[in-house]
Image: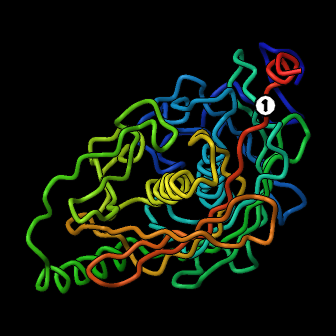
């Protein structure tokens, strides 16, 4: 960083964002990638910035940036790199198959309360990641650094489709499922935001039926999750479901003193599209992550079939030094 006003690292700049279409976003405020560059021909760098006043990512109860905002920044970086450097067509839909991330240094997400979260994403796509590799489950690895410190590591894989083939496949899939569709689900009232670590009710993605049963709340007017129209429930919303369900389960089990908990890691597998016109139910169970955090397995079902499962690791946020001093 050359100065607080002109943050430039090497040849990457933070002065403007890439065109929204490259990040598959509609609103300019939903674009987090500022610049990209090639590193050695097989790796790529992306400069990313998450605005502090964002309606979703700033909706938190602690002075830490939300680690999931970095996951979204990496997702966008992969899309931009694919189009800018690997020949992926701009209109080619991509389907995430699996994704795992781990927060390596939670202190890197501490909010200065003066500047937005800025960092560099280093992406290493799999050997098959080109615009011609349709229908193949292509892996990727990425790291996210803040001021040179390793903040997060990520890995996963996804499938890219030609636009025409994707539209035909999804139209056939929806027709087949509509034949056995249940009646339109009753509206579900979202849970109180304080139960899942939120302040704004709009950002709550879970509700309970009278059963009681946890169900996903799909608000298609949400300005971030539905920045543009989808033919399925988007992945970022499902990640938020994993987080909120894990926080709720850990809190109700007495494993967390507060729902304002840090997500230290997620390992998720997506086995089918989550459709917009049928209820998505959610089950949770505490699990052993093999690490020091609190583990919760979250499973999503729709029309009797499992569509996604994730192992979420949580931990309380560190006590701020000033509060620790007051305690002593």
Q: Residue shown at 43%/70% (left/top)? A: 283
6, 328: nearer the viewer? 328
Left/right placement of residue 229 relative to residue 285 reads left
Q: Residue at x 83, y 21 (%)?
A: 327
Above or below, comparing residue 52 to residue 98 in the picture: above
Instruction: Pinpoint residue 305: horizontal percent, then vertical percent.
Output: 35, 84
Q: Is residue 291 above or below residue 119?
A: below
In the rendering, at what x and y percent does residue 324 appear? 84, 24
Indicate the position of residue 229 as horizontal and vertical percent values. 30, 52
| Residue 248 horizontal side relative to residue 290, left or right | left
Q: Which residue is mark 1?
A: 319
Rendered position, 272 above or below 51 = below
Residue 189: x and y in percent read 24, 47
Left or right of residue 136: residue 293: right
Quadrant in the picture for the C terminus: top right
Q: Determine the secondary structure under disc 1.
A: loop
Q: Residue furthest left?
A: 183
Quadrant assignment, res 108:
top right
Residue at image point 52% right, 74% down:
309
- Nearer the observer, 233 or 312: 312
Which one is nearer the viewer's eye here, 88 or 248? 248
Residue 42 in the figure: left or right of residue 251: right
Q: Who's the residue at 55% across and 29% down the image? A: 58
Which quadrant of the rendered structure holds the N terminus?
Answer: top right
Within 10 Å of the Cα at label 1, are there few (<14), some (14-19), or many (20+) other Cα atoms? Answer: few
Q: In which quadrant of the rendered view does residue 170 lie?
A: bottom left
């Amino acid at each position: 960083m050359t100065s607080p006003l002109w943050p430039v690292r090497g040849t990457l700049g933070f002065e403007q964002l890439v065109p929204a279409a490259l990040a598959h976003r509609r609103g300019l405020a939903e674009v987090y990638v500022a610049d990209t560059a090639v590193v050695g021909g097989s790796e790529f760098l992306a400069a990313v910035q998450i605005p502090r006043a964002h309606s979703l990512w700033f909706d938190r109860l602690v002075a830490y940036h939300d680690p999931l905002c970095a996951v979204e920044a990496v997702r966008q970086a992969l899309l931009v790199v694919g189009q800018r450097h690997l020949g992926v067509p701009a209109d080619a839909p991509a389907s995430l198959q699996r994704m795992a991330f781990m927060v390596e240094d939670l202190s890197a997400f501490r909010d200065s309360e003066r500047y937005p979260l800025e960092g560099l994403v280093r992406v290493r796509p799999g050997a098959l990641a080109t615009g011609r590799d349709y229908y193949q489950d292509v892996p990727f690895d990425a790291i996210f650094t803040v001021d040179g410190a390793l903040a997060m590591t990520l890995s996963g894989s996804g499938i890219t489709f030609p636009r025409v083939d994707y539209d035909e496949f999804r139209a056939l899939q929806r027709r087949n499922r509509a034949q056995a569709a249940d009646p339109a689900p009753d509206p579900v009232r979202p849970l109180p935001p304080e139960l899942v670590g939120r302040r704004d009710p709009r950002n709550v993605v879970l509700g309970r039926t009278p059963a009681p049963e946890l169900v996903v709340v799909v608000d298609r007017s949400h300005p971030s999750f539905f920045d543009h129209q989808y033919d399925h429930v988007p992945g970022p919303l499902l990640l938020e479901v994993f987080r909120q369900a894990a926080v709720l389960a850990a809190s109700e089990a007495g494993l967390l003193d507060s729902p304002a908990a840090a997500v230290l890691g997620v390992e998720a597998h997506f086995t089918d599209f989550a459709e917009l016109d049928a209820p998505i139910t959610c089950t949770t169970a505490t699990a052993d992550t093999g690490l020091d955090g609190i583990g919760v397995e979250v499973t999503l079902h729709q029309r009797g079939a499992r569509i996604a499962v994730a192992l979420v690791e949580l931990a309380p946020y560190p006590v701020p030094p000033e509060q620790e001093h007051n305690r002593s």
